[in-house]
Amino acid sequence: LRITPTDKVQQTILMNVSENTMIDFHYELQKLCWCDHNDETLQCANFDGNKTGNRDVIIHETMSPQGIACDWLSNKIYWTDSETNRIEVASMVGPLYRKVLFWTEIDQPRAIALAPMKGLMFWTDWGENPKIERAGMNGDMKTRRTLVNRDIYWPNGIAVDHATETIYWVDGKEQFMDSMDYNGENRKHVAQHLSHPVAVTKYSNKIYWTDWRSPCIYVYDSASQVKQFLKSTYVPVDVRVWHGTIQPRHSHPCERNNGNCSHLCLLSPDPSGYTCACPFGIRLLNETTCSDGPKEVLVFARRINICVVYLDSPEYTYKTLNLTNTFYTIGVDYDPIEGYIYWTDDEILKIQKAKLDGTAQEDVITQEILHPDGIAMDWIARNLYWADAEMDRIEITTLNGKYRKIIIEDGLYEPRAIVVTPELGLMFWTDWNESEPKIERANLDGTERIVIISSKLEWPNGVAVDSQKQKVYWCDARTHKIEYANIDGSNRIT
């Protein structure tokens, strides 16, 4: 990242940032922020207009962040992600709260710009149906509308002139810069026959932009028309003018006790001027208060990590847990009573556990374990079951791993997944025996064992049970099917 004062003497202020980095700033907080594509993060650094200070990662787990915009009134950061096709927001001050605002009918979102005094945001979309959209900064679908969807191809950078309530944007394919008002009306050509404009910003009576094919920053004003402002060593991707007048102070409802919101106070174009919102995965209990945490989650293992999908909110955002030394996680289950996740790791030959937020990670089983596969939680009796595909046995342990017992070891060939149903007092597991693959059932102590499915199986993997309807479900990696049957194996259906 480089800074260029009015004397046009360039100075590098940040090293080791990824290519195609988009930037924005928060003048009052003295923060310069950018998207890092290599690390898939959003980062900020202290900046006083001349030099930068400490740099911090403020957002992890982005996929392909494109545009970034700081709300300097309520201290939020907004960004687009062209891989997840989402627009998100997070707090910049205080606890980190993050929320997905839009995730439907978005295809390759690019740049984003804010008008906090109006509670509005604008973004460009490079997808199959290119367009420019507008919505409330609170993510209210009722405020969302398309401003431009004709005579547009590769909409790139977008900028807002707050004084005149004018939007400027550039199109890399059609090679123009256009303007319009906040309602998408009064569209005008500002500059044409550009090469491949990428980013644009407005300051005073001048408009600055970058070009993908040129190592230059260009400037336009009504008097001098288009001219080269600065030539750089590298091709500049984004451009901003650092000045306090670009981010004028303005009273807003979130400045008073956070709008009485328990978590996020988001500006909006509604008469109230704001909306209380919750971080992803957490429900809003009333107009101001969020629940203590997620109530419904989906946990899945992804070999080198474990992820949690929050089912309480409709966007189904997932979070990768910050765990250490996870190399080949296979089986995973969740204890809803104490809030721990348990998993097997076939590389380090352990069963481990951690809290739902990834903290309090510790070992449960570390000895006499060769190929830990499926794992299942008995949340009533407080026991843990697992299948070992190398030792050909199913074991049970207390949750602290202190006491363990082999409950089934005869006639097992390669036990894989396992599930328990404490309400029915039963457990089910799959066995990958090449000649006789099967699905079996037994009591939770291993007694009354029976084979319930033994025909038309190849590689039975995962198994699940609906205890209320008394159905058992399984998937087969070789037949590429998901099937289910009654818990006695009858009435089998694909």
Image (cartoon, grey):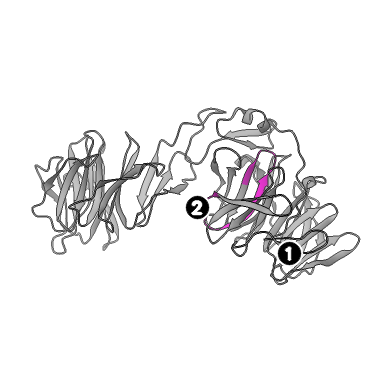
Look at label 2 and name its amino acid: Glu
Give 314 or 296, whichever is nearer the viewer.
Answer: 296
The residue carrying pointer 2 sits among few (fewer than 14), some (14 to 19) or many (20 or more) residues within 10 Å by Cα, namely few
Local packing at callout 1 (Cα closer than 10 Å; few below 14, some 14-19, many 20+) is many
Residue 88 position within the rendered picture, expressed as x and y whole percent measured from the top left: 57, 47
Amino acid type, label 1: Thr
In this picture, is 275 found above or below 111?
above
Q: Secondary structure at mark 2?
A: loop
Q: Quadrant of residue 446?
A: top left
The boundaries of the magenta stretch are 58-77
Q: Secondary structure at mark 1?
A: strand
Residue 151 visible at all: no
> Which residue is pictured at 90% across the width and 63% down the height?
224
Q: CA distance from mark 1 to mark 2?
A: 28 Å
Q: Foreground: 400 or 424?
A: 400
Q: With 47 as the anchor, is 282 left or right in this view?
A: left
Residue at the spot of label 2: 61
Which residue carries the number 1 mark? 210
- x, y percentage for residue 372? 23, 54
